[in-house]
């Protein structure tokens, strides 16, 4: 039986097209549409996430300003507040920015040097010394300040511990979130030298020193016997930075969408 030209085409009966309605749609067009939708959606979501981070940073900045104006806590109050927030892991639960006032004495332990720190373009360390408030309470880490590193990493800065005695320390406390890639201490211990370590992990430090340590660091307004610079960067990325990143993602989404529409238009013209 000969097949007529009419049977090779879609038949129209009473205005209704029979046959495969997607017969004229190529696989390349479908892939083009899917790729456009997926990539465009991802770029827009990244921009929206940056905007949400910017909003959080603005609120966090207001929280820090409010804490700076509050009266200084004593050590039991800080420990109680720490226990109340210990189950939360989000940034809003950090105790950074609270004021603290204590009477404490240096512990006979080596100084601690947090490695890979940068201050005003110089690479170096943040120096810490362990202090004791009472024998029944956890020790607390006191920041002495930033000290630059020499050209030879085998040579550590020549720092002397704060001399024995009781000191009135008042300042602000801070916490650092755990590094998701590596939160191990990696201590380098040498006799009669400071301990150089890689991450400010209080549980790991407590295990190293065989004593409980509070989960915050005290940055005193005046460090006894020291005048080192004290960096204060409670918010690594500002709200303005996140807004700038959001604008970049939205711009990329718009450029990508325009490019894909131009490609689709060229394909249509060719056919």
Image (cartoon, rainbow, N blue to C red):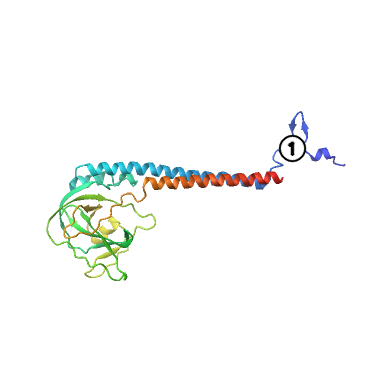
* Left or right relative to 254: residue 155: left
Q: Which quarter of the picture shows residue 21?
A: top right
Task: Where is residue 183? Give x, y as percent.
Answer: 34, 57
Task: Where is residue 59? Give x, y as percent.
Answer: 33, 41
Task: Where is residue 233? Give x, y as percent.
Answer: 31, 52
Q: Which quarter of the picture shows residue 110?
A: bottom left
Graded by Cα atoms within 10 Å as few (under 14), some (14 to 19) or many (20 or more), the crowding at tag 1 reads: few
The foreground one among 270 and 141 is: 270
Task: Where is residue 56? Give x, y as percent.
Answer: 36, 42
The foreground one among 180 and 101 is: 101
Q: Which residue is mark 1?
A: 19
- Which residue sits furthest right? 1
Residue at 51% of width from left, 47% of height from top?
Answer: 252
The relative height of residue 21 versus residue 235 in the rendered view (above or below) is above
Q: Which quarter of the picture shows residue 190?
A: bottom left
SS for callout 1: loop
Number of numbered discs present? 1
Residue at 69% of width from left, 44% of height from top?
Answer: 269
- Which residue sits furthest left? 165
The relative height of residue 82 versus residue 223 in the rendered view (above or below) is above
The relative height of residue 134 versus residue 125 in the rendered view (above or below) is above
For the C terminus, the image quarter is top right
Residue at 78% of width from left, 35% of height from top?
Answer: 11
């Amino acid at each position: 039986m000969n097949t007529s030209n009419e049977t090779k085409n879609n038949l129209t009966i009473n205005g209704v097209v029979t046959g495969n309605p997607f017969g004229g749609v190529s696989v390349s067009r479908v892939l083009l549409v899917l790729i456009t939708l997926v990539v465009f959606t991802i770029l827009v979501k990244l921009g929206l996430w940056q905007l949400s981070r910017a909003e959080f940073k603005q609120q966090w900045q207001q929280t820090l300003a409010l804490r700076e104006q509050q009266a200084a806590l004593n050590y039991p109050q800080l420990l109680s507040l720490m226990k109340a927030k210990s189950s939360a892991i989000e940034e809003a639960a950090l105790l950074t920015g609270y004021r603290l006032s204590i009477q404490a004495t240096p512990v006979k332990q080596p100084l601690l040097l947090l490695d890979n720190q940068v201050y005003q373009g110089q690479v170096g360390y943040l120096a810490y010394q362990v202090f004791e408030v009472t024998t029944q309470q956890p020790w607390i880490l006191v920041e002495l300040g930033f000290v630059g590193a020499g050209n030879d990493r085998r040579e550590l800065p020549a720092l002397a511990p704060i001399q024995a005695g009781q000191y009135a320390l008042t300042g602000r406390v801070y916490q650092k979130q755990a590094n998701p890639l590596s939160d191990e201490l990696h201590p380098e211990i040498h006799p009669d030298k400071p301990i150089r370590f890689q991450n400010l992990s209080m549980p790991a430090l407590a295990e190293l020193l065989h004593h409980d340590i509070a989960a915050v660091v005290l940055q005193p307004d005046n460090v006894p016997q020291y005048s080192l610079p004290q960096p204060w960067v409670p918010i690594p990325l500002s709200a303005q930075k996140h807004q700038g990143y959001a604008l970049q993602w939205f711009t990329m989404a718009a450029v990508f969408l325009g490019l894909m529409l131009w490609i689709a238009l060229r394909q249509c013209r060719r056919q």
